[in-house]
C-alpha cells in the first residue's frame, strides 16, 4: 500500500524542499512583477494590470452570485424535515414533497441503498486542549439537541495530556455526566511527546479515533455504518446536521470514498468580537458559503465527516501537520487513487469569531489563526511529490487540475489584495511625466474596483441576516457599528489575508516550519 504520510527530516529530499518553496517563490515574483514590467514598458505593465483587475472583477461578480445562491440554498436546507426524509428513503415511499429532488432520490436509491438510515451510528469527536467548560459544554449540548436519536450517537472527548489536571478532570466529568444521554460518552487522553508528531489537533483526533475504532469493533458495529464527525470545542452543529449528513451518506454512490463538509459560520460570539474580527469572521463565513456552491473546489475544513472505515483505511488524520483538516482531503484522495469527492452539507456548524482576553491579544490571535490556515500551502509540495514522483494510479489530468487550483488559491491568497492595492500606481513611479498610459491607469483601475465593490451591498445585507439575536447588554447603536465596520475591509484583507499568506509561504522557503498548533484563545464576554 502506498505511503501517504508527510515526509519529515531526512525524508525530505532536495526536490521536496524546492516544491515547498514554490508557492512563496511564485507569490513574491508576482508581487515584484508590476514594478519590473513598469520599468521596461508602461504599455506592457498596463496590459498586465488591467488584465489582472478584470480577472478579479469577474471573480468578484461570480462570488456575489454564488454567495446569494448558497445563502438561499442553506436557508432551505435548514427548514427541511430531514428525519421524515430519512424515513421515506428507508421505506421507499416519498411522503415529503419539499424538496422536489427528494422523491426522485427515493425512487432511484431506496431499492439499492448500500446503507440504510436506521443502520447508521455517529461518532462525534471533540478534540480539546485547554478550553474552559463554558466553551466545551455548549458544544456537547448542541450535539445532544440535534434532531437525531441520541442513542445512535457516541460522544468522544479527546483531551490532551499536556492540557494539565484541570483539563483531564473536566473531560472525565463531562463524559460521565453525558454518557447516559448518548449511546455512550467517553474521554480519551492523547499522550504528550509522541515521536513523529507535531503538537496539534491531528495527533489528538487520530489517537482518539484509533481508540474508538477498537471500541466500535468490541460492540460489533460495522465501521462502514459509523460516521465520524470532528468538532472543535466551540463548534455548535445545526439541529439538522446529523440527519442531513446521514441522508447524504446513504444516497452517495461511493460513500466510502466521500467526505462530507458542512458550512462553517463564525457567528457564535460575533456581537462580542472587535470590529476587525467581525469583518474577517463574516468574510470567512461567506467564503465557505461560496465554496459549498463549487464542489470541485471544496476541501475538508475544520468540522467534517467521513465514515470510520474510510478513516481506518487512510490511517486517520496526519499527525505531522497543523492543517490536518485540509490535508485530510489529499490523504483520502491518494489512498483511494483519486476516487474522492467532498459533498457539501448545506446546514451550518456555528463557530466562534476570534476573541481573546484583550484587544491586542485578539488582534494577534486573529493573525495566528489566519497564518495557520494559510499554512495549507505546505500541501503544494506534498501533492507534487506524492502525485507526480511516487507510483500511483491517480488520473493525472484530474490531479493536474486539482493541483493547479491548490497552487493558484494560495498564491492569490498572498498576492491579490496587495496587487489590487498598488498595481495600478507602479507605472507612475517610472513614467510619471511622459506617459499618458501611466497617468490614466489609476483612473481606469479605480473605476473597475468601484464597480466590483458594489458587491459590498450584498455582503452587508447578508451579514445582518446571519447575525444571531443581539445580546441585551448591547444598545441599538451597536447595530450601526456592524454596518460601518465594513470600512475596515481593505485593511483586514491586506494585514490578515495577504500578510498571513506571505508569512506562511516565506516560512516554507526558509524551512522555518510551523510545527505546533497554536490554539486560538477563546474568551467569553459575560
Image: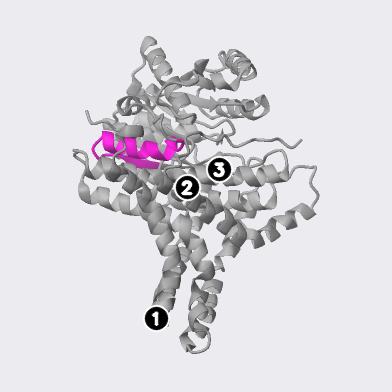
State which quarter of the image contains the C terminus. top right
Q: Is residue 338 magenta?
A: yes
- For label 3, the SS is helix
Q: Position of residue 257 (x, y in %)?
A: 30, 34
- Residue holding disc 2: 504
Decide which of tag 1 and tag 3 comes sooner along the chain: 1
Q: Which residues are magenta?
A: 322-343
Q: Residue 41 shows which numbered tag?
A: 1
- For label 2, the SS is helix
Residue 96, placed above or below residue 156 = below
Tell me if mark 1 has few (under 14), some (14-19) or many (20+) residues whose alpha carbon lies within 10 angstroms of its own. few
State which quarter of the image contains the N terminus. top left
Decide which of tag 2 and tag 1 comes sooner along the chain: 1
Q: Is residue 175 magenta?
A: no
Q: Position of residue 431 (x, y in %)?
A: 49, 83
Give the label, 1 or 3, closer to the camera.
1
Front-lying residue, 204 or 116: 204
Q: Is residue 373 visible?
A: yes
- Residue holding disc 3: 369
Q: How was the colour assigned to the protein in this rendering?
A: one colour
Q: Position of residue 391 (x, y in %)?
A: 18, 38
Amino acid at each position: 500500500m502506498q505511503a501517504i504520510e508527510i515526509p519529515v527530516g531526512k525524508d525530505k529530499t532536495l526536490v521536496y524542499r524546492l516544491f515547498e518553496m514554490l508557492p512563496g517563490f511564485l507569490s513574491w515574483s508576482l508581487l515584484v512583477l508590476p514594478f519590473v514590467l513598469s520599468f521596461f514598458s508602461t504599455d506592457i505593465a498596463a496590459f498586465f494590470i488591467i488584465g489582472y483587475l478584470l480577472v478579479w472583477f469577474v471573480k468578484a461578480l461570480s462570488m456575489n452570485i454564488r454567495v446569494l445562491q448558497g445563502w438561499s440554498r442553506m436557508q432551505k436546507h435548514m427548514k427541511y424535515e430531514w428525519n421524515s426524509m430519512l424515513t421515506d428513503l428507508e421505506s421507499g415511499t416519498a411522503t415529503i414533497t419539499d424538496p422536489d429532488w427528494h422523491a426522485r432520490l427515493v425512487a432511484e436509491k431506496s431499492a439499492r441503498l448500500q446503507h440504510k438510515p436506521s443502520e447508521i451510528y455517529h461518532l462525534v469527536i471533540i478534540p480539546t486542549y485547554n478550553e474552559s467548560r463554558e466553551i466545551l459544554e455548549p458544544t456537547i449540548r448542541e450535539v445532544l439537541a440535534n434532531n437525531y436519536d441520541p442513542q445512535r450517537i457516541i460522544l468522544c472527548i479527546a483531551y490532551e495530556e499536556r492540557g494539565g489536571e484541570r483539563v483531564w478532570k473536566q473531560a472525565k466529568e463531562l463524559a460521565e455526566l453525558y454518557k447516559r444521554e448518548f449511546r455512550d460518552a467517553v474521554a480519551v487522553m492523547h499522550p504528550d511527546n509522541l515521536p513523529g508528531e507535531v503538537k496539534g489537533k491531528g495527533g489528538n483526533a487520530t489517537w482518539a479515533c484509533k481508540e474508538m475504532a477498537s471500541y466500535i469493533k468490541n460492540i460489533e458495529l460495522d465501521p462502514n455504518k459509523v460516521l465520524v464527525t470532528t468538532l472543535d470545542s466551540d463548534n455548535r452543529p445545526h439541529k439538522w446536521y446529523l440527519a442531513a449528513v446521514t441522508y447524504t451518506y446513504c444516497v452517495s454512490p461511493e460513500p466510502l470514498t466521500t467526505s462530507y463538509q458542512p458550512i462553517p459560520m463564525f457567528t457564535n460570539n460575533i456581537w462580542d468580537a472587535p470590529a476587525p474580527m467581525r469583518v474577517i469572521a463574516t468574510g470567512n463565513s461567506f467564503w465557505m458559503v461560496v465554496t459549498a456552491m463549487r464542489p470541485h473546489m471544496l476541501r475538508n475544513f475544520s468540522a467534517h465527516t467521513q465514515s470510520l472505515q474510510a478513516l481506518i483505511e487512510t490511517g486517520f488524520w496526519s499527525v505531522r501537520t497543523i492543517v490536518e483538516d485540509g490535508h485530510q482531503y489529499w490523504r483520502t484522495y491518494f489512498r483511494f487513487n483519486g476516487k474522492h469527492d467532498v459533498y457539501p452539507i448545506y446546514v451550518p456548524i456555528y463557530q466562534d469569531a476570534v476573541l481573546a482576553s484583550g484587544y491586542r491579544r485578539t488582534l494577534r490571535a486573529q493573525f495566528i489563526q489566519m497564518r495557520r490556515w494559510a499554512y495549507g500551502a505546505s500541501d503544494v509540495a506534498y501533492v507534487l511529490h506524492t502525485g507526480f514522483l511516487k507510483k500511483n494510479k491517480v488520473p493525472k489530468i484530474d490531479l493536474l487540475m486539482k493541483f493547479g487550483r491548490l497552487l493558484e488559491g494560495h498564491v492569490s491568497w498572498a498576492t491579490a489584495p496587495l496587487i489590487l492595492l498598488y498595481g495600478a500606481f507602479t507605472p507612475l513611479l517610472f513614467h510619471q511625466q511622459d506617459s499618458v498610459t501611466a497617468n490614466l491607469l489609476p483612473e481606469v483601475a479605480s473605476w473597475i474596483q468601484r464597480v466590483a465593490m458594489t458587491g459590498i451591498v450584498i455582503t452587508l445585507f447578508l451579514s445582518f441576516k446571519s447575525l444571531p439575536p443581539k445580546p441585551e447588554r448591547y444598545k441599538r447603536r451597536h447595530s450601526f457599528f456592524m454596518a460601518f465596520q465594513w470600512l475596515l475591509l481593505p485593511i483586514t484583507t491586506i494585514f490578515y489575508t495577504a500578510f498571513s499568506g506571505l508569512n506562511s509561504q516565506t516560512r516554507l522557503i526558509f524551512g522555518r516550519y510551523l510545527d505546533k498548533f497554536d490554539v486560538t484563545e477563546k474568551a467569553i464576554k459575560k
